[in-house]
Amino acid sequence: MPRHWHMISRPARGIVSRSRFSTLSSAAPPQATDATQQTRQSVHLPRTIASLLHPAQGGQPDAEHVTIHGWIKSIRRMGRISFAHIIDGTTSFPLQAILSKSQAAGLSTGSSVRIAGTWKASLAGTAQQSELLAEDVSLLGEADPTTYPLQKKFQSYEYLRTLPHLRPKIPFNTAVLRLRSYISQNLTSFFAKNEFVQCYPPIITSSDCEGAGEVFTVSSNEKDSKGHFFKSPKYLTVSTQLHLEALAAAVPRVWTLSPTFRAEKSDTHRHLSEFYMLEAELSFVETLDPLLDLIEDMIRQLVSGLASSRVGNEILSLSGDLKPQLEARWEGLMQPGRWKRLAYSSAVEDLQAAVDKGEKFQFLPEWGANLQSEHEKYLAGLYNGPVFVTDYPREIKPFYMLPTPGDDRTVACFDLLFPAVGELIGGSLREHRYEELIRSMKSHGLILAGDDSEHAGLSWYTDLRKWGTAPHGGFGMGLDRLLCYLTGVENIREVVAFPRWVGRCDA
Amino acid sequence: MPRHWHMISRPARGIVSRSRFSTLSSAAPPQATDATQQTRQSVHLPRTIASLLHPAQGGQPDAEHVTIHGWIKSIRRMGRISFAHIIDGTTSFPLQAILSKSQAAGLSTGSSVRIAGTWKASLAGTAQQSELLAEDVSLLGEADPTTYPLQKKFQSYEYLRTLPHLRPKIPFNTAVLRLRSYISQNLTSFFAKNEFVQCYPPIITSSDCEGAGEVFTVSSNEKDSKGHFFKSPKYLTVSTQLHLEALAAAVPRVWTLSPTFRAEKSDTHRHLSEFYMLEAELSFVETLDPLLDLIEDMIRQLVSGLASSRVGNEILSLSGDLKPQLEARWEGLMQPGRWKRLAYSSAVEDLQAAVDKGEKFQFLPEWGANLQSEHEKYLAGLYNGPVFVTDYPREIKPFYMLPTPGDDRTVACFDLLFPAVGELIGGSLREHRYEELIRSMKSHGLILAGDDSEHAGLSWYTDLRKWGTAPHGGFGMGLDRLLCYLTGVENIREVVAFPRWVGRCDA
């Protein structure tokens, strides 16, 4: 039978005072109308280690008698006393607890504990300002050292990928979980501040946005007479863009952070079958510049916030030799001043000039062909930072893009190239004129000659151009790739808790 | 060729000053390190109507010459001048523009416009404090009155469901889009404040959390020799709970707002095949009370914030006769004081007492059977507000629930029942003990006799109990059902932009 809070929170027990709750007491609940203004926690939950080690107001924490929960990171037995380092995932820094020999019995790396005790200043010269003098120790869950899979200090990424359910416990992975949460929260604020509406476009859809992607099919044992659940075959979304465009015809600025899917056989360090994409769509923008400005500001304020955040500092601290390189990356993204904006045609000229000077590319740069990863990395290096390449040839881009004003050979689109990793964000203005859109769908082979009725299942999308159409544009960013860049993690499978790629869908 | 911002932003053109940007000028970009402290917008985007009608500081807006974009809500032609009501979805209130006869030519309900002009005080006695005296009007996109589908004022919900791509333009639906965004932002803040980590559990999975749900199967044309993309059949998640439990073993408080899927043939106003679920999981909680406290606080601070928000007021204003009822609902959720917490056994006694007093139920209440919707609504009415019913019989609940301390016939779980709508949230403590979990899986038929190796594909889940297991619990809330309750919308298909249910997956 599990123990209960009321058993250990009774003052009569002598070791736990109310102060182990970092919040208001139940005798004086917060006024409901003030709840949104509170910066403190509003509910009674077990105190976290972060709240002890990093008290919000700075200086000493507000508690002398505390109860903490966590997992043993390490334990040193020194005769009559033991020093245990406890983590609970809320901070990378362990809490040091001092235990008696009997209190330490049975504890080993990975086991979970509840410790009540006195939180007091450490001896001078120790790294931690305070430590927990244990009075009552409960072993909640053992971790048999002979079988616990995370015992060893150095395990291969490949091995850890077979343990997606356990590897979040590794401190760097825990910090990445918190980093993702930080980014999500930061972007939510950023878009709200800029009057964007956060939307939730559908996951199951009949549209294949790019017109060429490999899609996952969704089916069910519940079938109609034709063998379908939804009357016809349906797929997992490859991009929410088309649906966002419909929503941007109601509210002028929309964004989403949505799962997207590609059934590609790519077994690379940059591809997943399931990944989170941040997509935004803006009505009433008529050039690329407002989109690029928005992206610069989004990334710049995100990284600036990160650099002064606790989780940012923890990521750096846990990065070892990579720390200076990461700091340089972050610094590069925080610099004021516009990022380079370069037309595709000029980019090709840059690449060809490089070839003339002896640069060796596997693929020769040529107008009309897509930029290869090697080209993208060269350009980001050449301009020493993020580079927007704009106005690619129409033939190599999807049907929905607006032609570049004054040049029908290209479309008003862009890719944002990052040093070392290449493309991170892509976007465009959208063709908002009905006749021109139909023409583009025909020239891209989406509408067959003579078939003007259904528009390849996209008549709802072409409909948007029939009544009150407006110039608009948007972009998409792979969130997991951004995480890779910010953490220096090379393989995208290491920044996603439960990664899915061809042949692998563990847990 | 589209017009460009620089064409209309040149001061030389005389009608547009810099002040149409609600933000800093490009000559003095914000310091990157200060960006996170800004409350004003950080980028240059076309000014919204909300920023004019509801200036952030109160009082008069900060602009005399402005350019706005939007859609014509209505237009009245009065001889030499016309009064146009313009909406852009950022507020339910239309902006009034005064146009000359020639400026108004070709404008009709639904068409999109850009209007530059002078923003000045209206004549006394008019509803709006200021209005826009048009100087330059551009028709961006026509809306032919003879074909525009949203022309008529009263259309059936069924008809509008055939236009999921257009119906977001209807003011109430636009407000619901913004309400959803408000809720998402509010909950993001609430959970961050309470030290929760926002997580993104996988969508494609091999687990069927409830052990009985109808699932969607995910497949691809890209197949291995056995016909699978992921080596074996995979499904769309029905709940992220099991994966959240793994993450809660690394960070003690996790939450997600994630799409979930059920391939149910239910053609009701309460069911969708694809819906967003808020799920949270907390390590180190050993009774239900902290979970119920958290839920109360979450809902109470959400509704309190909503009641004092602009979007909240707009929802009320747009609700017509329903407004008093909605206000009463919201008021009910904001009241201080604990919501009723009632054990299932007592609930059944209440229901049986009601039957004795002549209450007619379609299903007779009986210990051991699930509560029917009629029972749930009766209980919520009996206690005049939200009611937590706890500790249901073990046999009618999933395998992962912890037995009620002291009573092995029931499990430590709860449903939160709302007046009028019934169950909104469900949760439980989880069985965190390895042997007991295996026993429960066997008694629920998930593990067949003699098959102890694979644990029905859930060996990763049982693994979590092997090393450092800890008491934990969590809950899930259907976000779309909450939206229904808060807006008084009866059919869940009306609060989701692109609803999917059996036989229907439009656009």
Image (spheres, coloured by chain):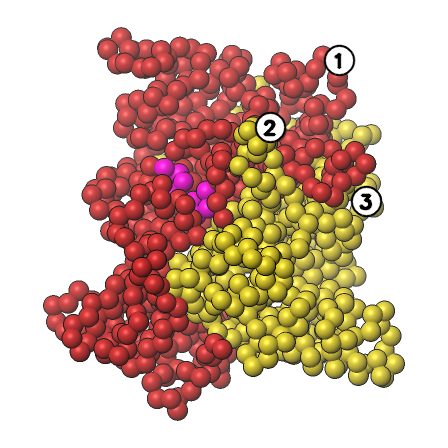
Chain colours: A yellow, B red
Q: Using the image, tell me which numbered label, if any, was put on residue B450.
A: 1
**For the residues marked 3 and 1, what is the alpha-carbon distance in whole angstroms?**
32 Å
Task: Return the residue at label 3.
Answer: A158
Q: Using the image, tell me which numbered label, if any, was put on residue A221.
A: 2
Q: What residue sits 60% from the left and 45% below the top?
A: A236
* Residue B297 percent location from the top left of the image: 40, 40
> Neighbour class for label 2 at 10 Å: few (<14), some, many (≥20)?
some
**For the residues marked 2 and 3, what is the alpha-carbon distance in whole angstroms?**
35 Å
Up-down relation of residue A471 to residue A506 (above or below): below
Q: Is residue B85 visible?
A: yes
Amino acid marked by disc 3: Glu
Q: Look at the image and give the residue range highlighted in magenta.
A: B491-499
Up-down relation of residue B219 to residue A373 (above or below): above
**Residue A40 as seen in the image, left or right of residue A448:** left
Are tags 3 and 1 found on a single chain?
A: no
Say which of marks 2 and 3 sits in front. 2
> Neighbour class for label 1 at 10 Å: few (<14), some, many (≥20)?
few
Q: Is residue A496 visible?
A: no
Up-down relation of residue B326 to residue A371 (above or below): above
